Image: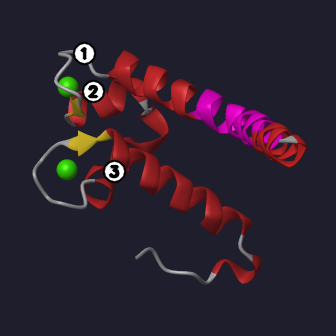
């Protein structure tokens, strides 16, 4: 009985620690979603060229590179992946990595 209680407490502690560890990621996800939603003028959960230019001006010339599935619109995942990759490239020693 005591062993089961200790095991249950240990599991609770691990779950609590795990939940705390994910909190910054959840905040980042939330901030990403809010920025994307703010740029998504028509609310279709995709950015067209004008929405990208208005909401993410730093990437206005990268539309074709961001639109990896070539459907003419940018999903939140495509934009996030592209910006994350750009951040990796900026931090890479020698900066000789190529985008996938
Ligand atoms: Ca849109
Ligand atoms: Ca796309």
| Disc nearer the start of the sequence (1/2) | 1
The residue that appears at 57% across and 81% down in the rendered structure is: 97
Residue 54 to residue 91: above or below: above
**Span highlighted in magenta in the image:** 12-28
Q: Is residue 89 left or right of residue 71?
A: right
Q: Position of residue 41 (x, y in %)?
A: 24, 15
- Closer-to-camera residue (13/55): 13
Q: How many marks?
A: 3
Give the Cα distance between marks 1 and 2. 7 Å
Q: Which residue is mark 3?
A: 78
Mark 2 and ligand 1: say if the CB distance to the nearest ligand atom is below 8 Å: yes
The residue that appears at 71% across and 73% down in the rendered structure is: 92
Q: Is residue 5 left or right of residue 42?
A: right
Mark 1 and ligand 1: say if the CB distance to the nearest ligand atom is below 8 Å: yes
* Element carrying mark 2: helix
Q: Position of residue 68 (x, y in %)?
A: 25, 61
The label shown at residue 41 is 1
- Quarter assignment of residue 16: top right
Q: Circle 3: is it few (<14), some (14-19), or many (20+) Cα within 10 Å?
A: some
Q: Which residue is mark 2?
A: 51
**Where, quadrant-wise, is the C terminus in this rendering?**
bottom left
- Closer-to-camera residue (23/91): 23
């Amino acid at each position: 009985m005591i062993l089961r209680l200790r095991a249950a407490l240990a599991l609770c502690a691990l779950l609590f620690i795990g939940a705390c560890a994910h909190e910054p990621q959840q905040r980042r996800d939330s901030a990403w979603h809010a920025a994307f939603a703010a740029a998504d003028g028509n609310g279709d959960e995709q950015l067209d060229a004008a929405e990208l230019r208005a909401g993410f001006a730093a990437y206005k010339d990268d539309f074709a590179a961001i639109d990896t599935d070539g459907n003419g619109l940018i999903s939140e995942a495509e934009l996030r992946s592209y910006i994350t990759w750009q951040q990796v490239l900026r931090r890479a020693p020698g900066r000789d990595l190529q985008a996938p």
